[in-house]
Image (cartoon, helix red, strand yellow):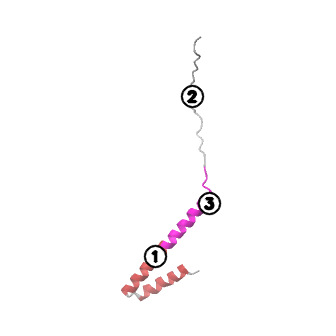
């Protein structure tokens, strides 16, 4: 008795390619947004502090008053 052999032929799909859209979970989006907000807040605060220190060292009263007003609005709770 001969061994039974099977032949498989594969045909390439010629139809329209389907793209699956996978959404990011809400918790991940919220966490990423909060993290970015905190990083931006900290960076902006640090830059204002650096500019305030430079204005104090250089004796620029008008610049210091302008920056201190921005800083007060920035840290107001």
Name the quarter where the N terminus is drawn: top right
Query: Is label 3 in a helix, a strand or a loop?
Result: helix
Left/right placement of residue 20 relative to residue 55 reads right
**Mark closer to the chain start, 3 or 2:** 2
Q: Helix or strand or loop: what does disc 2 sit on?
A: loop
* Camera-nearest label, 3 or 2: 3
Give the farthest residue toward the top.
1
Q: Position of residue 33 (x, y in %)?
A: 57, 64
Q: Quadrant of residue 16?
A: top right
- Report the residue marked by disc 1: 46
Residue 20 spot, x, y in % from top left: 60, 45
Magenta residue span: 22-42
Residue at image x 43%, y 82%?
A: 52
Q: Give the residue drawn at x 37%, y 85%.
A: 57
Tell which residue pokes out farthest to the front in this image: 1
* SS type, badge 1: helix
Q: State the CA–CA distance, disc 1 to disc 2.
A: 62 Å
> Which residue is identified by label 2?
11
Circle number at residue 27: 3
Does residue 51 appear to the left or right of 8 in the view shown?
left
Kindly check if marks 3 and 2 are in contact, taking CB atoms under 8 A apart as contact: no
How many residues crowd around disc 2 within 10 Å: few (fewer than 14), some, or many (20 or more)? few
Mark 3 Cα shell of 10 Å, populated few (<14), some (14-19), many (≥20): few
In the foreground, 53 or 13: 53
The correct choice, above or below, for 56 with respect to 31 in the image is below
Q: Is residue 56 shown in magenta?
A: no
Residue 64 percent location from the top left of the image? 44, 85
Furthest-left residue in this view: 58
């Amino acid at each position: 008795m001969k061994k039974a052999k099977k032949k498989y032929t594969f045909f390439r799909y010629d139809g329209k390619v389907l793209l699956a859209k996978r959404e990011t979970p809400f918790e991940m989006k919220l966490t990423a947004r909060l993290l970015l907000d905190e990083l931006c807040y900290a960076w902006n605060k640090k830059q204002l502090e650096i500019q305030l220190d430079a204005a104090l060292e250089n004796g620029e009263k008008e610049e210091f008053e302008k920056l201190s007003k921005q800083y007060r609005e920035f840290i107001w709770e």
